[in-house]
Each structure stands twice: as C-alpha cells, then as structure tokens.
Image (spheres, rainbow, N blue to C red):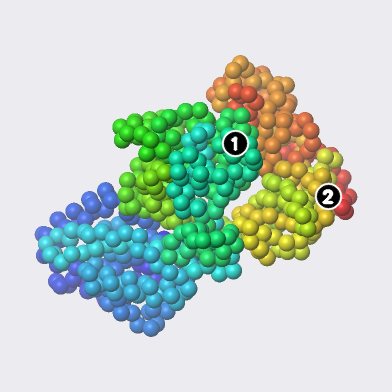
Amino acid sequence: MVDLLQTAAVPPGNRHDGPGSLSNIKGKKSSKKSRARRGKQAQLNPIYLLHRFVLVSRVFQLKLVNPTQYRFEHLATQLKWRLQEGRGEAVYQIGVEDNGLLVGLTEADMKGSLKTLKRMAEKVGADITLLREREVDYGLDRNIRKIAEVLVRKVPDDQQFLDLRVAVLGNVDSGKSTLLGVLTQGELDNGRGRARLNLFRHLHEIQTGRTSSISFEILGFNSKGEVVNYSESRTAEEICESSSKMITFIDLAGHHKYLKTTVFGLTSYCPDFAMLVVSANTGIAGTTREHLGLAMALKVPIFIVVSKVDLCSRGTVERTVRQLERVLKQPGCNKIPMVVMNPDDAVTAAQQFTQSACITPIFTLSSVSGESLDLLKVFLNILPPLSNSKEQEELMQQLTEFQVDEIYSVPDVGTVVGGTLYSGVCREGERLVVGPTEEGRFLRLKVGSIQRNRSACRVLKAGQAATLALGNFDRSLLRKGMVMVSPKMNPTICCQFEAAIVLLFHAKTFRRGSQVTVHVGNVRQTATVECLHGKDELRTGERAVVRFRFIKHPEYLRLSAKLLFREGVTKGIGHVTRLLPQDQNLNHDQNLQDY
C-alpha cells in the first residue's frame, strides 16, 4: 500500500485551488454537491485501501506526469522503501484522494501517471500490473475521468520470493486434490480425477482417490502476475527461479479417520491462510464444519471454494452458497461472506481479506469446465502477506529455532529433516542442537545443505519452510515434534504444563485422569489431566486452567502457544500459560551430547 501524500505534499501557498482548479471547477454551490456525491460514493465503494497514490491537484499532476529528475529520484526511493515494507509488493491507487474520495484523472493524465509509475518500477527493479480501472462521475465535467489500481511487484532475485502457505481443507470427495492439480498443472480435469494423480504419495491413495497424508504443491507468479507453472517440463527449480511470489498449497486429508494428520498439518506447518473446499452437490457435510472450526480455533484466515458446479444446476449452487452464508453468520463464526462473481470482486476480496478478520470470500468454480478458475488465480496473485518486513526482521534477530515436521532417508545424502524455521537465520554448515530426546537432552549436529521448494538454498530466514540435510546423523534418534536450536539457547523442556482451555464438546464430563491427544505447534503427544484449578470437572462450553502431563517423554513448548486437544468426540482449544520444567542440571553444557 502506498501513500505519497506526505512525502509529496504541496505547501498551501503553492496549491492551485483557484477558480480554474479541480476543486472549484463548477462554482461554489455545485462543488458542495459534487463533494457530497463523491463522499457518499467513497463510503459505498470497497476499492479503498489504507494508503493511496494521490494525483488530485494540478501541481501533483504536473510533477508526477512530467517530474523533474530530483522529484523522480525521490519517488523511486519511496517506492523502493514501500516494496521492502510490503515484502516485495505494493499497491498504488491512482486518482483517489487521501480521504477516499474518487476524483479520477483524464485519459491523458492517467497515461502519463502510469508511464511515470512504470519508470519508477524499472528504476528499482520491479514490474507493474494494472489490476482494474474504473470510470467515475465528476459532476458537470464532461471529460471521462478514471481511477486505476496498480500492483507493483519486485523482480525475483536470489530466490528471495514472497512465499505464502495455504492449507487446503474440506470433506472427503469435495475435490481438494483435483483443484490443486488443475491450478498447479494448468490442465482441466477429465471428471474422473486425472488431475489429482500427481499429488498422491501412496498407492492406496491412487486406488481409493482419497488423500491420507500431507502433500505440497506450488503455484508461482512472476513479477507481472502471470502463472509460471504452465509450460512443458517445468521443474520446481525453474518455477522458483522465475517466481516473484509463490503459493505453497498444503493438501490435507478430508476423511475423519485421518483427522490427526489434518490437525498436525494445521498446527505444525503454520499456514498463512486456509482454503475450505465444499462440494456444490453435497453442501456442508462430513468434516466440513469440523475443519472450519479448527481453522477458526487456530485463528487462520479462511476463504471458501465451492467446487463441482458443473455437476449441479444453478439453483443447487445458490442453495449451497446460502447454506454457507448462514453458517458463517452464526454467533460462533461472526463472519461476513463475500461471494466473488467477477475480477473486480476478486481484487476487492484479496485486499479486504487481510485487512479484516471478518471477511470470508466465497468462490464458485469447476475443475472440469474451468468456470471461475481465473477469479481464484487473480485472488491468489494479489493476496498480500499477513506480516510485514519489520516483523520478519525482528524474528530474524532472535536465536535459530527450526521445527522438525518430517524425517527422511535419502540415498547418497543421508538423513534429511523437513520443517519450518520459526526464528533466526539458518545457513549451510551451521552447528545446531536437536532435541529433546526421551532423556530430555539435546544432541549436537551440523547442517549440510538446505533446499527450499526442492531447489538449493544457502540461507534460510524466519518463517520459511525447507529441508535440511544432516549427513550421517542417525535417523532413529529423531522424531516429529523435535526442534533444532542454536547452542546458545537454553531451551525449556517440560513433562508438565498448564493451559487455559475451553471445552468445545464432551459426551459426559472432563475431569482429572482424562487422557487426550495434545497438539501444540509440531508437538503431538498423549497427555493426562493432572488437575483442574478451581473445579472438579468440566462440561461442554466451560473454561478452566488445566495442568497436563505428557505420558511418554518431555517436549519443548513456548508460552502463549496455541493448543488443541482431542480424544474421540472430546475436543478443546486453549493456550499455554505456564511451563513446569523437569529437573535439569544447572550446567547447560551437560544437557548437550555429541552424536
């Protein structure tokens, strides 16, 4: 988002607000009516963002349409800063006042402004894409005036592309894997699941057509907003090299018997957004409500895709959409559904989605006919990151902490671990410690090579997912839920911890001695309820502070981490409030062991 008003402000004495200016073009009386009409239009129109590229007064137009060299350098420097702040992206609104009034520019001024913006982008190594253009009514002025919205995106360099993770949720047979296959491969499905075959990891998944494990697919956009996946023999390395923005889809299981895998994917892989896929012909069924509740409990922004519209009549699709709207508006959700019908809606939805936690876009599409697939691509292309560069830099200043989510044995490479770097920076050859083991200790190791999205990477930054090669490190000493941290860190490991929880559902009562499976980040282990502070038992909907004890081995936890627990039909959410570390030797070095 860009605001040039402050840096390009014109002193009051230099403003051309005389009789021939835009603000007084119709005389005093007409000007008031025009401003009132524009003010009402500004309130009703959803195009506005927090910052705007203002080209209103004549002085602004003269300087931005044909800026001096000094002025041009100043604007280019500001654009560079905005791109850095937006992690490689910025959105300019041209022809909109800073208070949101739609003023518009003439055709000549708009062309000149876009030309200047393109020169600014080329100066800082970026490209511009016109997202949308709209005519506005400017009172008695007969000249056609337009406003425009432009996306400025940095050209990729050294693999530092913007990476967003999207978890794909939905009931079994709703078309999740097929949709991902169509999006990432560029070929429509044949109606019998051909597009999803490359996503499956196991033979039984191909035979049954049902996902049982977690798989990843990538969709790359270049600096001009074009999908780079769609070409012959396009490998993951080539996609990464030519992408300015990468969408990593985390394909999760829809069947209820694989619920623990789905929960692990949501808690461990830290998705930025969640895409809930609902079949148009079945509506809200099976695990749809449960997946929606999981995403909301973990505070993951969610948007909805209604698939298989080619199998249904328009009335059936509308009935499914109305059903979704009712669920989203319920007191437990308090969401504002927004049905996306055209490209303009897709742009608005992408911008409003990250600004307001209440907005929930709804897409209706088909993976067989391709209906409305382009709207989803427009949405994903414009979707901005949730965190800015300042927040990422603060995480990078902390000590290294890498969450171990997957463990592999690769021929000629050795042991490889996959996961997400929670904080710090990780480099090739860096020495870390991994743990905790069953005895509560940490083992020293050395990072060999790093791969991010299946291509080599020398430096890994906070928030990025990657795989790390550990050479001949014994795989049997590793497990999911471990962390790799800097030797300078003194991590707190515990067998017991306390959490403030709310019991979402329980058949009878939740009391001391109950056993549940606890999910905290990448940690997944059965725990026993030791005590409930101030209460003897809990019923559905009640809250309490509960002390849990892991039954197998200690784990590394963080304060305030989100917690989710389940056992059969029992479900609850909460956050960690207190850690009760096990007895540890005061000498930190004695808790470290050489492998």
Q: Using residue 251 as the reference point, say whether residue 491 is left or right of it.
A: right
Q: Amino acid at mark 1?
A: Gln
Instruction: Please report the residue visible at 48 percent of the width from the left and 58 percent of the height from the top.
Output: 230
Question: Could you tell me residue 261's position as x and y percent?
Answer: 63, 37
Residue 207 tag number: 1
Question: Could you tell me residue 279's position as x and y percent?
Answer: 44, 35
Q: Can I make out residue 82 in this image?
A: yes
Callout 2 secondary element = loop
Label 2, label 1: how far apart the Cα atoms are: 34 Å
Instruction: Please report the residue visible at 28 percent of the width from the left and 72 percent of the height from the top.
Output: 111
Residue 526 tag number: none
Residue at the disc numbered 2 = 474
Q: Which image quarter is the N terminus in?
A: bottom left
| Viewer-proximal residue among 181 and 449 | 181
Q: Using residue 464 as the reference point, say whether residue 183 is left or right of it.
A: left
Residue 212 to residue 478: above or below: above
Q: Using residue 511 as the reference point, say whether residue 236 is left or right of it.
A: left
Return the disc, 2 or 1, that comes first in the chain's sequence. 1
